[in-house]
Amino acid sequence: MQLILVWILNAVALLIVAYVLPGISVSSFGSALIAALVLGLLNTLVKPVLILLTLPITIVTLGLFLLVLNALVFWFAGSILKGFHVNGFWWAVLGAIVYSLVSGLLSRLLYS
């Protein structure tokens, strides 16, 4: 039950990001649910491999390259999904940061 609630909160966070940032669009709540699911799967399956492959760059940049990886995963999800669109890399950077902040705040409400 808690997993479904976190999934819905992540979809709401994605809708908030689309409302705040004009370079990111989500067509409906159903699209936000699918995008939140795909982002969760990409962050679970693909991102650890990318972190391992780019570990030297991440160490040299003192971890700042992880922002680039987050943006690339966010941008990739926007490019493969129909109802979720990211207009470019810099919108993906901003979107990934705002999405992380909003979903963190919403999940903090869940666990407090």
Image (cartoon, rainbow, N blue to C red):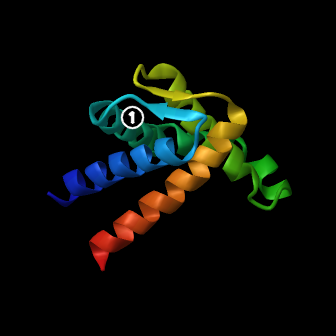
Check disc 1: other Cα within 10 Å, few if <14, some if 14-19, many if 20+: many
Mark 1 lies on residue = 35
State the residue at coordinates (79%, 57%).
59
State the residue at coordinates (59%, 32%).
75
**In the image, residue 108 above or below residue 55:** below
**In the image, residue 60 above or below residue 69:** below
In screen coordinates, is 11 left or right of 56? Answer: left
Circle 1 SS class: helix
Image location of residue 84, percent across then percent down: 45, 28
Residue at the right extreme, as displayed: 60
Image location of residue 77, percent across then percent down: 50, 30
State the residue at coordinates (35%, 37%).
32
In screen coordinates, is 91 left or right of 3? Answer: right
* Quadrant location, the C terminus: bottom left
Image location of residue 69, percent across then percent down: 65, 43
Image location of residue 16, percent across then percent down: 44, 49
Question: Mark 1 is on which residue type?
Answer: Ala
In the image, 79 versus 18, the foreground residue is 18
